[in-house]
Image: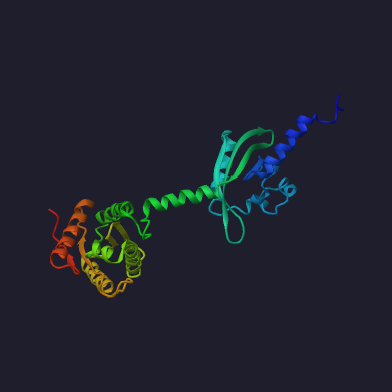
Amino acid sequence: MPADHMLPADDRDSLEQLKIMTERIPGMIFQFFRSTQGAMSFPYLAGSGALLGEADKRLLAEDANHAFERIDSEDFPQLMTAIERSAHQQTPLATQFRLRWNADSVRWIAARAQPERRRNGTLWHGVMLDISEQVAHEAHLRRLSDTDALTGLANRRKLMKRLDEEIAKSNRYGTPLSLMLLDLDHFKQVNDTWGHLQGDQVLAEFGSLCTGLIRTEDTLARLGGEEFAILLPLTPQSHCQALAERLRHHIAGHDFGIGQGKVTASIGVAEHRVGESRERLIDRADNSLYIAKEQGRNRVISCTVTAIG
């Protein structure tokens, strides 16, 4: 029989395996204590020390603030609210926050813990996990949902959302709002003559050219193919038409890698009427674009502004 102070071999192996596992997980197992007076500490920490940098575990066992000082200032109030709610209601702690990784970067941390009421405070038993890759992937998916993959511009979905927002403002405050629809003329010939790879380069460069000529508050979107749109808040039709002419001139004079004058654009312009629907505004801008193409392309046509009936 083994001595009383000796663990059986199977138990020692299990403890060693547990130690190896906790050292390798992308996070930390912890106990966190908050006294009724608000003092905080980490009585127990095990796992990836990288989450806490060089912080000494014995120091954190006395004062958790040495770790809390690295939490992003915007996330700290939310974290403290979650801790206080969990302590008061004795409900599980579940929160996310950013932790300063070094001078140049931060890591996203998810904390999950179960509270245990103690005589002089609350003790949580939980785990902290590094979820930075998951957060980055989710942000990437959100960007993809609103972004055209080829040009990096807003896509149709994003434009429609922005249109709804700006139309609501225009209806409420009576402020001007204009929409510009652009279509590259005879773009099929570009693809047929220089190939689709060069055609894609033209579209991407077209987006960059237009971005450099509009304001940051304007929204430039690719609707699909060679069709684009620009939403211009606080802009009457006369100013939008002037910008459209400037864009048309720059587009016609740009090389795009296939020779100057090989790419031109037809542009239709319409100003929002108070009370008008999104669909009606788009339809009027699209009619203007159709007229521009019918009249020979490489031109700007503005929809006549009349009172809504």
The answer to whether residue 76 shows anywhere in this view is: no
Q: Position of residue 141 (x, y in %)?
A: 43, 49
Drawn side of residue 88 relative to residue 162, left or right: right
The answer to whether residue 37 shows anywhere in this view is: yes
Q: Picture quarter containing residue 244?
A: bottom left
Q: How many marks?
A: 0
Q: Picture quarter containing residue 257?
A: bottom left
What's the image's color scheme?
Answer: rainbow
Q: Position of residue 35 (x, y in %)?
A: 67, 40
Q: Position of residue 270 (x, y in %)?
A: 20, 61
Judging depth in this view, the residue of 52 and 32 nearest the camera is 52
- Which quadrant would the N terminus be assigned to in this image? top right
Judging depth in this view, the residue of 11 and 215 nearest the camera is 11
Q: Position of residue 298 (x, y in %)?
A: 20, 69
Drawn side of residue 44 relative to residue 299, left or right: right
Judging depth in this view, the residue of 21 and 200 nearest the camera is 200
Task: Check the image and name the residue furthest to the top.
Answer: 1
In this view, 307 is above or below 95? below
In this view, 251 is above or below 164? below
Q: Residue visible at 64% across and 43% down?
A: 25
Q: Residue visible at 56% across and 54% down?
A: 73
